Structure formats: C-alpha cells, structure tokens
C-alpha cells in the first residue's frame, strides 16, 4: 500500500469500520469517502504533531465543502445519505479484516500520481474519488444540490496551489514535473528558512487554511487588481484610499480567490506574500543589514514568477534605511526589481501616496494606482451581513438585522472621523463584546445578553462617543423616550421672562433630535438678539448642561477678538508660509475635541464680516477643514450667535411678538454702519431660528432675585449651619434697586453683591456668624443691615 498521511490513515481506519457496519466483504470507495468526511472523529489524538497534520487536512476538506454548497454541515449530510444508500448496523463486526476492492485500489493509484514522494493525502484521495464518483456518491451529493464536479474543481485547485502549478494544466503536465513541483512546495520548510518565509506572511496559505475572510463586494476593485496583475509590464497595483475603507481586505480577498482556484488563467499557482517593513527593520543593528534582507527577499520573489509581494502602507519604503549623507533608501532598491517584472501589490492612503510616492516620479510610474472609495450604506450593510456569522460565533450571541442597520447608520452619523466599513464593524464588534460581558460582576449581577439589537448598538455608540443615548436613539427614529422632552421645563425654571424664546428653542431642537430633517448641517443654528443681561449666554450654558452633561461642554468664542480680517487664521489655522502654519485653529481644535457641544459665538456683531465666511460651509455641511486638511465634525453641535443689538440697530422685537410665525425682520440702519453688516444674506439663509430675548420686566427681575438669594442662602446654611431671612422691606428695596431695563440681570447681581454678600462676608471673616443660628436682613434709612433673628 502506498505511503499515506496521518489524515489518510485515519480515513482508511474509519472506512474499514464503515465497511464492517454495512456487512460488506470489501472496502469500497463509498466507505472511503465517508472516512474522508469523518476526520473530525479522529481529532482527539494527544500527539501534537499528528493533531496538527490531521486538523490541516480536516480543515481543507471542510473549506472545500462549505465553499461548494450552502449547507451548514455538508459533511454530516453527505455521510448520512451514503449510509442510507449502502446500509449498515450500529456496530461494526469485531475481529474481521477488511480489504480494498479493486476499484478502491485504483483510487489509491490515481491519487499517488498527484502526490509527492509517493505519499497520498486526503485531498488526493478525494480528487481521485470525485473523478469517477459513481451513482451512489452522485445521488448523495445531489441531495445537497451539488455535483461531484462542483467539489472536484476546488479540490484540484487546492492541490494545484500546493504543487505550485496552475490548475488547468495539472492533468497535462508530465508526472516528473508534478513530482518536482510538489517536492519544491513540501521541502520549503526544510533547512534554513528563506527570506520570504522569515520576513513574509503567506496570505494564500492562510486562505487555504480558512484563516481569512469572509468577504463581500468590491468586485470592481478586485477586477481592476487582476487586470493590472495580468499586464505584461507595469503590473504593480497600489490600492489608494482613506484608512478603514478595506484596502487590505481586498488583497486578502484576492488571496482567497487564488486559494479557491479562481482566475487560474492569470493567477493559477500564484501565492501572495505579505512583506512587513517592520520585520525587515527589526534588529537591524549594522548598516547594510536592512539592504541585505530586502535584497534577499526581492531576489527570491523575482526568481519565482508565482510570488506576488504585498506591502501594506507601501509609502514606508520611501526613506526606510536611509542614513545621514546617503542617497539610497529602500525605494531605490525596489525600483530595478519593479522594472524587471517583479509583481508587487501595495496599499496607501491618498495623502501619503501623494506625499511620498507621487513626489518620486521614477517610483510613481512603476505603480498603477487603484482608488478605493468608501462603500455606500447598502454595501456596508452587506459587508457586515457577511461578517455576522464570525462575530456571532466569537461572542456567542445572535446579531439581529436591526443591529447591523444601526451599526452602519449610527457610525455614519456620530463617527465622522473614520470610514466605512471599518467604523461600523468596530461598533458592532464592541456591541457584541458588551453583550457577552455586560458588567464586572456577571455572577451576581447582570446576565449576559443573548441578542445584539438596535438598543445594544445605540448604547455602545453612546458610550464610545459620549453622545447622550437620547440623541443617538432619536437619530434612529425616536424609539425611546427622549430626555429632550424635559428641556422646556428645565429652561423655564431657570430663566425668567423669556417664555416665548424658550418655546422656539425647544420646538426647533425637537425637530433636530427627532431626526426628521435629513440634512448634513449642525443640529441647530440660532441667533440670539437682545439687550445685555437678559439671559442669552445663560441660555447657552443651560443647553450645554441639559443636553451634553455639563456647562463645560460649551465652546465659547469671544467674537470681539476677531474684529480684524486676518483673525480668520485663528479659527482654522494659518495658511502655508505664514507664522503658525501647522497649528490647529481654535475652532477646529475645539470641535475635534468636543464635537458634541454648544458653540457660542458671543458678541457676534463685533466680528469682522470676513470671519463669518468660515461659518457658511460649516452651517451648510456640518464640517470644517483647517489649512492642513484636518476635518472637524460639527453635525452634532448647536451653534448660537449672540448679539446685544438694540431694536434700532436692525431688529424689531415687536415684529416677533406680533407675528411669531414669521422670521425676525432685519432693517439696515444707515446711521449705524456697524449694526449688522456681518449678517449677509448667505449667512441669514443658514440660520434656523432668529430669537429675540425681551428686556426683563419688574416681575421677572423679582423672580430672578428670589432665585439668586435662594442659592446664596442655601450655600450659607450648608457651609456655616446658619440661616438668613430677608424682611419684606429688604426684599422690596432690593427689587427696586436692581431693576434696570438697560443692564438687565447683570445689575441684579451687582445689587445682591453690594447689599447682601458684602455684610455677610464681614460677619464670616470676623467670626461673628457662628454666634447666632438665625439672622435677619432688614431695611432702614441706611440701607440693609444684617442682625440676629432672635
């Protein structure tokens, strides 16, 4: 009997048992086919070397079957069908020696013709059986909707790759040539490792073992890649695209196609070897070590036309290994090899390709750039759908369709700094991990979730981005009760006399957070106009506190500092050639750090009109780019332009009060040329709501006074354990003094500071405050005095 591998030996033993169960006198090819499909029963061996060999052959057969049909467990289904056809008992006959039939002997002889050193593997046996399967095996395969030819093709392709031969020419090759090719493949690991094995990673071999994939889509890019590789000259493609669009995945998908025997007329027998520049540079102590290693790799790759090098981040070869005073680097070593037929695939981002490779015309002309764009929403969802089985298996959860849709939509909305499909895959992967491990005390607290649904993905996005869950859920259709519903009451409890302004703010934000408007701009853009001290800035702070978790989430830009035209550079950075080029502008830096915030443009009327040109595109598209090309996302921010303009300077309070359904009118005042020149029509069209804050009335000021005093008195009682009460006369006096239509609430704060805080501070610093538990503020002809309340 021919020398056989560990897997073929175990398959033979199982075939003998099957023959005994079927009450047969000889081992037929059907029994042997069952044995080849039953290698999983032999994986319990404790011999590590035998287990490694067995698993490799088992995985190869399973990959072939799973690729040929859609059945979840094709090997089990085929085994059962064959047993029904040939019959059998539950237990094999003991002590009976089984022999091969003549047909089975013929299968071994045919399999040996493809093997190296006369050693027959499971794949060789399967190929020999499927060449002449017979009616029993054909019928069993037909039950799964496949034929023997459907399985034979990938089996032959697998053998052809191992032999280093192109599949269509396997049968026509001379036997000695086949033996030579097989020996060259199997003997590659003997002796000293080659440069390619030492510094490279064989993607084709990993694809054969099922370690890559699954993949979906990118047919256009794959076809372009194969076209360039099939050219006679300049056959070095470079996949160019932003980080996260799937450039490396396209190369791995090509390796899978080669492993499956596809495109064999162009890539048959080829193998893709990934070359790591980091591995080449590691432990290169002396000058010349890198050059020696790189030249060794390139010599081996150039000597074997079946090798295709793959270099991720190929722009790193420019400048690698260059020493001070030397002109040569790794790219200079590559150039002659690329010109003489070496095939190389690279990946790079657009900016890095233009900066490093595009700047070197001699290197650039040796590559053919293939643009890889970000997939659309539907393509990204299909890619996640293909990846879902592996994620479910890894996390032990079930991922619903709504979770895949949410992962794509939410990552597109709330993660503008990354690209599809990478950001959606990362979000779904994290959601699966959170579902499997919801808390640190799983034993006594929360049980692991069995499903990943929309809410799980929304919670994950909220945790990663810091966006409140209400905003995330609202973007997906308002499936949960939103925190925003309490904004109206929250603002009215803290702002006095501005009920109409609060209502308009609340209604606009309801529409924004409900996700009804499909527009790319910010959540909302407001213009707050009104006299000083009426609550414009305080409203912005309260919005940041309620919607984004704290008043520190407000980005405040004092626009009076941008009165000069040249101050635009402070917002987006200085242009090239000017001082400060390369430094982030204030606006871009703040939005990149806190994209979910309230941006207050205070004293907007004091800024130079040229400054607001920066905001035109920002209010329209929700994004802004600085002079270095760095983008800041403003789609989840609220912009407020605050101005202390009077009605005579262009705005009419009465127009808004009498016609609340219409926009605030703007009247140009020739006498005040600095009135609202910044509000050009282009900017006005991008503002969602023009909101006028009315001057505070006496009742509103009295309410603000009570709120201010309540806060101060509560703090006094907390820190010093004493109470202070104001008499009726003291309250009336403070209300009359602090009311100022011109200065608004700011006069109130000055009044409370002068008549309440100053005398209280004297009592506290002198130590007298602790002598009495209760104090009383009274009014007399000298003002307000604080006396013990006994």
Image (cartoon, rainbow, N blue to C red):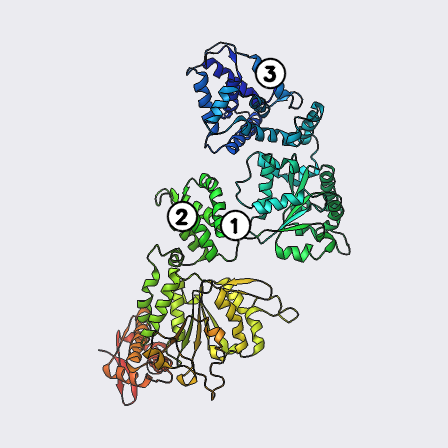
User: Residue 402: image x %, image y %?
Assistant: 40, 48
Task: Give the SS element for disc 3.
Answer: helix
Residue 46 in sight here: yes
Pick whichever, 206 or 444, lies toward us: 206
Task: Give the SS element for disc 2.
Answer: helix
User: Residue 307: image x %, image y %?
Assistant: 68, 38
Left or right of 566: which side holds 431?
left
Q: Is residue 166 above or below residue 387?
A: above
Q: Is residue 315 above or below residue 340?
A: below
Q: Which residue is mark 3?
A: 106
Left or right of 460: which side holds 275?
right
From the image, which quarter does the C terminus lie in? Answer: bottom left
Q: Quadrant of residue 730?
A: bottom left
Q: Which residue is mark 1?
A: 422
Task: Give the SS element for disc 1.
Answer: helix
Looking at marks 3 and 1 on the same chain, the residue that comes earlier in the sequence is marked by 3
Marks 2 and 3 sit apart, C-alpha to C-alpha, by 55 Å
Q: Which label lies toward us, 3 or 1?
A: 3
User: Residue 487: image x %, image y %?
Assistant: 34, 66
**Numbered badge on residue 402:** 2
Residue positioned most to the left:
790
Q: Is residue 630 above or below residue 569?
A: above
């Amino acid at each position: 009997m021919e020398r056989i591998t560990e897997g073929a030996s175990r398959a033979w033993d199982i075939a003998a048992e099957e023959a005994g169960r079927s009450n047969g006198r000889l081992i037929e090819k059907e029994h042997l086919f069952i044995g080849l499909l039953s290698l999983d029963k032999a994986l319990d061996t404790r011999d590590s070397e035998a287990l490694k060999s067995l698993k490799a052959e088992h995985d190869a057969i399973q990959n072939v079957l799973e690729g040929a049909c859609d059945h979840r467990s094709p090997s089990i289904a085929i085994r059962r069908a064959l047993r029904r056809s040939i019959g059998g008992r539950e237990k094999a006959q003991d002590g009976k020696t089984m022999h091969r039939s003549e047909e089975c002997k013929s299968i071994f002889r045919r399999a040996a013709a493809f093997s190296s050193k006369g050693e027959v593997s499971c794949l060789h046996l399967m190929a020999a059986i499927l060449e002449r399967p017979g009616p029993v095996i054909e019928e069993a395969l037909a039950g799964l909707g496949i034929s023997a030819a459907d399985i034979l093709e990938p089996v032959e392709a697998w053998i052809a790759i191992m032999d280093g031969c192109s599949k269509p020419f396997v049968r026509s090759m001379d036997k000695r040539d086949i033996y030579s090719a097989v020996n060259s493949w199997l003997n590659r690991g003997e002796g000293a490792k080659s440069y390619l094995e030492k510094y490279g990673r064989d993607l084709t071999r990993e694809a054969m073992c099922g370690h890559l994939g699954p993949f979906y889509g990118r047919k256009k890019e794959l076809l372009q890649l194969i076209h360039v590789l099939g050219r006679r000259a300049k056959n070095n493609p470079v996949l160019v695209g932003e980080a996260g669009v799937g450039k490396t995945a396209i190369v791995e998908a090509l390796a899978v196609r080669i492993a499956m025997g596809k495109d064999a007329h162009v890539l048959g027998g080829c193998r893709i070897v990934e070359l790591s520049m980091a591995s080449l540079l590691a432990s290169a102590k002396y000058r010349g070590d890198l050059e020696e290693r790189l030249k060794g790799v390139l010599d081996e790759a150039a000597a074997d036309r079946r090798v295709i090098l793959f270099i991720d981040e190929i722009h790193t070869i420019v400048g690698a290994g260059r020493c001070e005073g030397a002109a040569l680097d790794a790219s200079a070593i590559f150039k002659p090899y690329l010109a003489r037929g070496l095939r190389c695939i690279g990946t790079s981002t657009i900016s890095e390709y233009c900066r490093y490779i595009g700047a070197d015309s001699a290197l650039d002309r040796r590559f053919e750039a293939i643009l890889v764009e970000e997939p659309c929403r539907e393509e990204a969802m299909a890619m996640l759908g293909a990846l879902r089985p592996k994620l479910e298996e890894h996390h032990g959860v079930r991922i619903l369709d709504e979770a895949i849709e949410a992962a794509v939509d939410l990552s597109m909305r709330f993660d503008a700094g990354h690209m599809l499909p990478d950001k959606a895959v990362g979000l779904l992967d994290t959601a699966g991990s959170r579902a499997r491990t919801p808390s640190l005390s799983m034993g006594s607290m929360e049980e692991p979730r069995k499903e990943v649904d929309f809410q799980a993905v929304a919670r994950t996005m909220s945790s990663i981005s810091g966006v409140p869950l209400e905003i995330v859920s609202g973007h997906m259709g308002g499936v949960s009760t939103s925190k925003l519903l309490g904004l109206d009451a929250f603002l009215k409890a803290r702002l006095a006399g501005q009920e109409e302004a609060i209502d308009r703010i609340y209604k606009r934000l309801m529409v924004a957070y409900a996700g009804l408007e499909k527009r790319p701009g910010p959540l909302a853009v407001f213009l707050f106009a009104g006299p000083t001290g009426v609550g414009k800035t305080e409203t912005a702070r309260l919005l940041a506190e309620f919607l984004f978790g704290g008043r520190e989430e407000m980005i405040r830009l004092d626009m009076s500092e941008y009165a000069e035209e040249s101050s635009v550079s402070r917002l987006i950075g200085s242009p090239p050639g000017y001082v400060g080029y390369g430094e982030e502008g204030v606006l871009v830096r703040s939005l990149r750090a806190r994209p979910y915030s309230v941006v207050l443009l205070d004293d907007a009327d004091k800024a130079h009109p040229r400054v607001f040109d920066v905001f035109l595109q920002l209010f329209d598209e929700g994004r802004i780019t600085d002079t270095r090309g760095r983008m800041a996302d403003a789609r989840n921010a609220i912009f407020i332009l605050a101005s202390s303009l009077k009605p005579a300077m262009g705005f009419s309070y009465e127009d808004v009060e009498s016609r609340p359904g219409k926009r605030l009118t703007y009247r140009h005042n020739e006498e005040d040329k600095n009135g609202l020149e910044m509000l050009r029509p282009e900017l006005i069209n991008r503002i969602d709501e023009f909101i006028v804050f009315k001057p505070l009335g006496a009742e509103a000021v009295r309410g603000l006074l009570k709120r201010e005093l309540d806060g101060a008195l509560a703090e006094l009682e907390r820190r010093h354990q004493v109470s202070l009460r104001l008499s009726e006369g003291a309250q009336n006096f403070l209300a009359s003094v602090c009311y100022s239509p011109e200065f608004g609430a700011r006069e109130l704060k000055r009044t409370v500071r002068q008549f309440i805080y100053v005398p209280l501070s004297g009592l506290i610093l002198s130590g007298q405050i602790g002598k009495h538990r209760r104090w009383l503020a009274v009014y007399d002809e000298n003002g307000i005095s604080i006396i013990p309340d006994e």
